[in-house]
Image: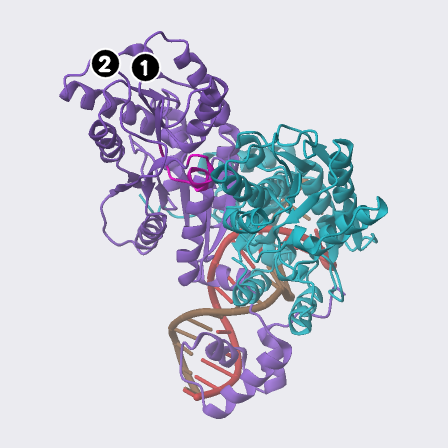
Chain colours: A cyan, B purple, C red, D brown
Amino acid sequence: MNQNKIMTIYDIAQEANVSVATVSRVMTGSAKVSEEKREKVETLIRKYDFKPNALAKGLSETKSKILGIMVADIRNPFYATLFMECEKEAGKYGYSLILYNTLSNPDLEVTYLEKMISMRVEAVIKIGGRIDDVVTDMEYVEQVNKVANSIPIVITGKLDGADCYSVRIDAFQATDLVMEHLFSLGHTDIAMIGGSTDTQSTVERYMRYKQQLRRRGIQIRDEYMIHHDYYDDRGGYECMKNLLLLEDRPSAVIAVNDFTAVGAMRAMAEAGIRVPNDMSVISYDDTIMANIMIPKLTSVSYNYENFGQMIIETVLKAINGEEQPRLKTIISELSARDSCGPCTKK
Amino acid sequence: MNQNKIMTIYDIAQEANVSVATVSRVMTGSAKVSEEKREKVETLIRKYDFKPNALAKGLSETKSKILGIMVADIRNPFYATLFMECEKEAGKYGYSLILYNTLSNPDLEVTYLEKMISMRVEAVIKIGGRIDDVVTDMEYVEQVNKVANSIPIVITGKLDGADCYSVRIDAFQATDLVMEHLFSLGHTDIAMIGGSTDTQSTVERYMRYKQQLRRRGIQIRDEYMIHHDYYDDRGGYECMKNLLLLEDRPSAVIAVNDFTAVGAMRAMAEAGIRVPNDMSVISYDDTIMANIMIPKLTSVSYNYENFGQMIIETVLKAINGEEQPRLKTIISELSARDSCGPCTKK
DNA sequence: TTGAAAGCGCTAACAC
DNA sequence: GTGTTAGCGCTTTCAA
């Protein structure tokens, strides 16, 4: 195995007694070629299973046909699903995706950004991560903008001085869905748990949550809002532990993502609290986990396929220099399942 | 944004009054350069934030510094985790990963294989997928071998005529762990569910399961072995539904992966069967799901970090043409958690 | 040390 | 239609 001479168009051209230009033409279909020569060339291509060198092609055309995509952690089903949809859509246009996991490591973000530049990816897609920090780190934004200067960047977070396109979930609309669902079930004592105060999308959820309570004339209780640095099950577990310390417990709990809900439900199970009989749980993202839990989680759902398509569409337009809005918005739906029930609190 | 002239070594060379060769030398450190010129060049590099074109570099050196990786479905935490570890390890050596999801679509597998060749990835990593089919599709293997002819391929499945390197889990050893654990808890009526008869690794698990029963003089019952085409929670759910139809139910159930276990546990919950009091559940892969379930799943665990490292190590050696075994083996450990208990069946 | 120039494999402008 | 050739941006002999 390994090493049986790799073919080039020169080899093909020679054996076919034509010029490399002709070979190139039949490969790309960029110009007319006589039936006869085309036949000959195509036969050889098949014979040798010739695959043109994408690096050379990329170099020559100054387009790599590669997109770079950075996610916080591909093990999170939210990211994985979105990645897949992006891949599917990008594939239709001949693009391949280089994936980088930043693991929320600022240094890695920068390192990877540089790698992508070197690789001459035609656009970078950033899903989550530092760009969504509430307090904008100007130094970082500057880094990003330096890149954006030559390569289009599409993010799923907020903009705030960053020179990118944004395709993001409308956190307000999503939260309205949650609140209305809970209200319709008679809940008024509602808590919100998980998520960091550093993350814009989280902050917006809390903001809207408070607005909605206020609108209904329901008192806002600080002890019903519990943040956590980690968006994993541990975070949810700890938040819920704290919540359960309260004398007057809520009848419903909103978790900022499925992971958090999962952790919360563990804490509840340990405390002998039944979902949804004793307490309702609702969350965001509608990942695979929502379906897996017992009871199944009611969760805010996005049309991931649309989401991915919109990202890629934005990428493509940006690459082609087409005019388009800087900010596009994804609206959510509610996947009502089994973790929410009527308010039973007297 | 977009387009402020991208620099090349020519631009740098010109402004520094040196030749491109010199610039190249300071970038790669491939040869001595006078302190003075080096300074000048480095200053300019920093000034313009110059990043060399990886495509040109790749073309020139005929090495892309890219690895292609094909997984069945990145949404499966098993694949996601392994991907991440590979990325981490590959990054140490300057490699980036292009990820492709085959979604078990044979056509896609071939398409992606071709893309990788074009991209001149230095090696391809295949995790799961058709190469692990029990009945070897000779046509497909031929396809693979044609690739392997010029690019090293590392798989996690069986070989069987495929000209690749394999880093795989020892299914026998893993299953021994499972059986011993169950035996030690007093179980003898043990079922195995999920997984397709088309998949080698699954078949091996069933095989060893039977061997172990036989060894202990326990009767093998066909109705205790239920296969399913899908390795997801639905598969597990349906298998368990069937199992529960039985008059004489097992006291413990082995699921071929966490997903299957999860689905099975749903069916059990619906039937009012408590885990582990009424029935024990154990599975393979120890993904995030194992930790999330209530009760937490006992599952066969691999050291994913080692796994990833071994894959990359194999890749690297293959790229460098170093001699190495065709088959390397990953041994498993058991993560004992809460889903298995002593046998309570009278 | 340093520079000139060939070469990596492909595309596209140009001339025939 | 078809071939020649000049890039694309970098590395690496080969001389000097």
Q: Secondary structure at mark 1?
A: helix
Label count reads 2
The answer to the question of whether label 2 and label 1 lie on touching residues, with beta carbons closer than 8 A, is yes
What's under tag 2, amino acid-wise? Ile
Residue in view at x 59 percent, y 86 percent: B16
Residue that badge 2 annotates: B220
Nearer-the-camera pick, B329 or B2: B329
Question: Residue B192, relative to residue B95: is it above or below?
Answer: above
Question: Residue B62, relative to residue B237: is it above or below?
Answer: below
Residue B302 in magenta stretch: no
Q: Secondary structure at mark 2?
A: loop
Question: Residue B324, relative to residue A251: is it above or below?
Answer: below
Residue that badge 1 annotates: B224
Residue A244 at least partly seen: yes
| Residue B10 located left or right of residue B288 | right
The N terminus of chain B, quarter of image: bottom right
Residue B235 at least partly seen: no
Q: Chain of mark 2?
A: B
Quadrant in the picture for residue B92: bottom left
| Residue B53 located left or right of residue B313 | right
Question: Residue B106 in the image: x percent, y percent?
Answer: 49, 28
Question: Dot 2: few (<14), some (14–19), or many (≥20) neighbours within 10 Å?
Answer: some
Residue in view at x 69 percent, y 73 percent: A138
Residue B285 in magenta stretch: yes
Question: Residue B124 in the image: x percent, y percent?
Answer: 42, 45
Question: Residue B178 in the image: x percent, y percent?
Answer: 27, 31
Work out how far the residue at label 2 is from the one at label 1, CA to CA, in angstroms: 8 Å
Q: Which residues are magenta?
A: B283-295
The C terminus of chain B, quarter of image: top left
Question: Residue B128 in the image: x percent, y percent?
Answer: 40, 35
What's under tag 1, amino acid-wise? Tyr
Nearer-the-camera pick, B295 or B292: B295
